[in-house]
Amino acid sequence: MVRLDSLDLAGESNVRMMSKALPGEFKVLGIGEQSHGTSEFFTARLLLIKVLAADPAFTKIGLEAPMAEVDKLNDYLREGRGDLKAILRSFRLYGYECPEFVDLVESVGRIGKARGKAIRFFGFDMQSPFQSLQNLRDSGVASDISDSLKSLMHYYELLNNEVYDHSISAADFAELKTLSDQVLDKLTGKAQTDEMVRKSIRSYRQFLLLNDSRHAHAMDIQSEIRDSLMAENVLAEMEPGRKMVLLAHNGHLQRTPNIFSKSTGSFLARKLGGAYQCVGLTTSYGFYTTIDPSVGHITDKNKVFAGDSTTWEYHFSKLAQPVFFFNTAVLKQSQKGLRLPGRYRLLVYGLADNQFFDGSLSDDFDYVLHIRKTSGNRSFYLK
């Protein structure tokens, strides 16, 4: 176990400690989080990024956010183009809209400049069609279908809530699919030499597949489609001799299937073996930020609790050390013959009635970084 300073989580002392403990033999390292609304998880990720930045092979950070929208982050860091808050708003994922993520982005920019080698962000999700379609329209690669692209974008704007909730009706989807096929058929043959156009087409095709009305109400099928496509997008970003980090929910990055479906991490582990490793971020007490339906808006006072003796978080809360990092393989070996807890926390978007699910941290993750007490992130939407 590596004992970390809880008062300066991303500080130099912890960077030195973690430089001896963080794995080096990987091509893709997933760094998860138990919720998208925990302030300290952003800081913990920045700590690990600082440690990895010493390795020149580390060049990319993947985000659980739409591909085309995330590319705008690189324009912002490289050239100062655009407004960072507007870029984050375009993700349509409120968990990123907070000062903690702004600090992480700005810090990555400074780290890249200090080491003389930029670290590039990329998105590996496909939950928004907007920037992909805008890219295709702006490219001018098929000016004869500019009006069709404009109509398609307007249609999605009218379906704004349905797009966000993945609840596009069968009738609307059929019309969108017909119009999309006409546009994509004309574009594909003209896109072979333009990387941005190819990537935008791929992202938009994935969006259509994810939102196909045939499985709109089958959460298990939709979840597996999404995670398998996210894994494909990560693999497409890999380069010889390079390393990358992925920032996503624990449930997506764990090496095993999650409670909903096969995870992105399980697809990557099957393809990459030991070249894929993952860190789970956990907490025992405090609060997290999410939408509370009872008050009708986002709050940062949603409780996190340790659970009973069947949970990993309960036992972590009893340790004297408030923040620590450990290798799960070492734990399993040292606890051989003993029964380990069988549940741990999984908080998806929205307020959860049940915080704990069956699972083993020691099987699902290669490493765990635990923070005993955490707080909700300072969302821009707090009232």
Image (cartoon, grey):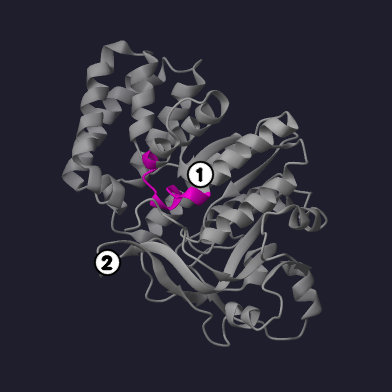
Which quadrant of the structure image shows residue 163? top left
- Residue 104 forms part of the magenta stretch: no
Q: Could you tell whether 380 is left or right of 285 in the image?
A: left
Query: Is residue 234 something one can see in this rendering?
Result: no
Give the numbered dot on residue 102: 1
Sequence-first tag of 1 and 2:
1
Q: Could you tell whether 296 is left or right of 202 in the image?
A: left
Q: Amino acid at mark 2?
A: Pro
Q: Could you tell whether 171 is left or right of 2 in the image?
A: left
Judging depth in this view, the residue of 196 and 350 nearest the camera is 350
Query: Is residue 377 something one can see in this rendering?
Result: yes
Which quadrant of the structure image shows residue 302? bottom left
Q: Amino acid at mark 1?
A: Val
Judging depth in this view, the residue of 197 and 43 nearest the camera is 43
Give the numbered dot on residue 293: 2
Judging depth in this view, the residue of 309 and 334 nearest the camera is 309
x 61%, y 35%: residue: 109
Which quadrant of the structure image shows residue 363? bottom right
Q: Secondary structure at mark 2?
A: loop
Q: Secondary structure at mark 1?
A: helix
Image x and y of residue 332, in percent: 75, 75
Image x and y of residue 297, in percent: 28, 60
Q: Is residue 6 above or below residue 307?
A: above
Image x and y of residue 380, in percent: 38, 50
Q: What span is colored magenta in the figure? A: 89-100
Judging depth in this view, the residue of 87 and 151 nearest the camera is 87
Quarter of the C terminus within the rendering:
bottom left
Image x and y of residue 141, in percent: 38, 13
x 42%, y 36%: residue: 87
x 39%, y 56%: residue: 221
Pair 1/2: label in front: 1
